[in-house]
Image (cartoon, rainbow, N blue to C red):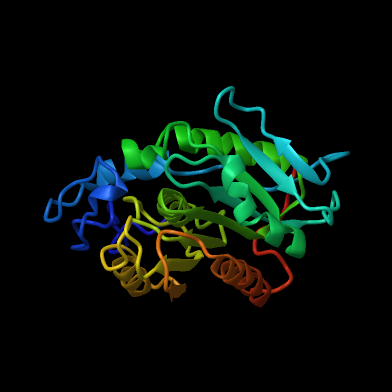
């Protein structure tokens, strides 16, 4: 973890970075011009965003193709989707996918499911504990804990390639994907953020590759106040960012989703056929 001279991100962007706050992005952020948090507070916040689950070699029989509910939450839960081509014991890429405000895991799944079928991707789609993600409302906490449990369960049932493991989201889910991805770059190799509003305040861990897209006519999270400020700062901080603008609003056009998934798979191959992290024996 790089603590000195590295990264302080905040709400549609950070006081320390001089980025503008977009009210639509949510509450619980400091105003532009506020003093950066002290290192101890930053360390506590960073610890709350950390994920410890890692891919393992599932013993014996593992889950097969299809949609499986997680069974970890009574009202709000999530699903794992394995495409028809998935074979137990054969490592497959996994994408943790996060819905927008007011959305759900099952409603967001169709965004990537056809591409998962085409490319043999596992999808882990999660419900936020509340109407949107914890860091948008108050700070990292219950959603991180639930995602931790969901990842651990998925890693125990499916054979996941640790060298091709991404976190993806749309709108609030895109902002949350950026926060989790940058905080857990030793787990996630890639981050895909479709129309993000902000980057939550984090310290970085690792250096995942990043894909960001945004509609030039977005009325919900205006591009000038969001991605056009986020992307230059990420690049300044030495992240490898693929950035795509398109004519449209607050949506993920199928062509953009396809481009993002193609980027993820191609970038994974560029890194080599050998996973950068070993599969752990359970």
Q: For the image shown, how many numbered marks are present on the structure?
A: 0
User: On the rendered image, what quadrant is the C terminus found in?
Assistant: top right
| 152 displayed left or right of 279 | left
Tell me if residue 190 comes above or below residue 238 in the rendering: above
Tell me if residue 231 comes above or below residue 51 in the rendering: below
Identify the residue at horizontal 34%, vertical 42% (top origin): 136
Residue 76 coordinates in the image, percent (x, y): 55, 29
Quadrant in the rendering for residue 64: top right
Residue 28 coordinates in the image, percent (x, y): 25, 40
Identify the residue at horizontal 59%, vertical 26% (top origin): 73
User: On the rendered image, what quadrant is the N terminus found in?
Assistant: bottom left
Nearer to us in this view, 22 or 34: 22
Q: Residue furthest top?
A: 74
Residue 118 coordinates in the image, percent (x, y): 75, 64
Nearer to us in this view, 85 or 62: 85
Q: Residue furthest bottom?
A: 270
Residue 179 coordinates in the image, percent (x, y): 41, 52
Identify the residue at horizontal 29%, vertical 60% (top origin): 4
Residue 282 visible in the displayed image: no
| 192 displayed left or right of 17 | right
Residue 98 visible in the displayed image: yes
| 102 displayed left or right of 223 | right
Nearer to us in this view, 75 or 184: 75
């Amino acid at each position: 973890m790089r603590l000195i001279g590295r990264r302080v991100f905040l709400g549609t962007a950070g006081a320390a970075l001089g980025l503008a706050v977009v009210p639509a992005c949510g509450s619980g952020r400091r105003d532009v011009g506020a003093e950066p948090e002290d290192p101890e507070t930053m360390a506590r916040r960073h610890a709350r965003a950390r994920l410890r689950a890692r891919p393992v070699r599932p013993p014996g029989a593992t889950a097969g193709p299809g949609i499986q509910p997680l069974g970890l939450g009574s009202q709000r839960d999530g699903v794992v989707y394995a495409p028809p081509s998935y074979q137990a014991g054969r490592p497959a890429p996994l994408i943790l996918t996060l819905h927008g405000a007011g959305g759900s895991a099952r409603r967001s799944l169709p965004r990537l499911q056809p591409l998962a079928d085409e490319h043999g991707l596992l999808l882990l789609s999660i419900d936020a504990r509340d109407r949107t993600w914890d860091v948008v409302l108050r700070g990292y906490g219950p959603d991180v804990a639930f995602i931790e449990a969901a990842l651990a369960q998925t890693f125990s049932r499916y054979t996941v390639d640790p060298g091709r493991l991404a976190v993806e989201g749309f709108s609030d889910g895109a902002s949350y994907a950026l926060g989790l991805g940058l905080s857990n770059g030793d787990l996630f190799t890639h981050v895909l953020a479709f129309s993000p509003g902000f980057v939550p305040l984090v310290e970085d861990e690792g250096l995942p590759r990043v894909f960001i897209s945004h509609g030039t006519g977005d009325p919900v999270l205006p591009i000038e106040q969001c991605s056009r400020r986020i992307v230059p700062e990420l690049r300044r901080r030495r992240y490898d960012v693929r950035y795509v603008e398109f004519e449209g609003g607050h949506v993920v056009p199928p062509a953009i989703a396809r481009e993002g998934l193609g980027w993820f798979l191609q970038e994974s191959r560029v890194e080599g056929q050998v996973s950068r992290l070993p599969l752990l024996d359970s």
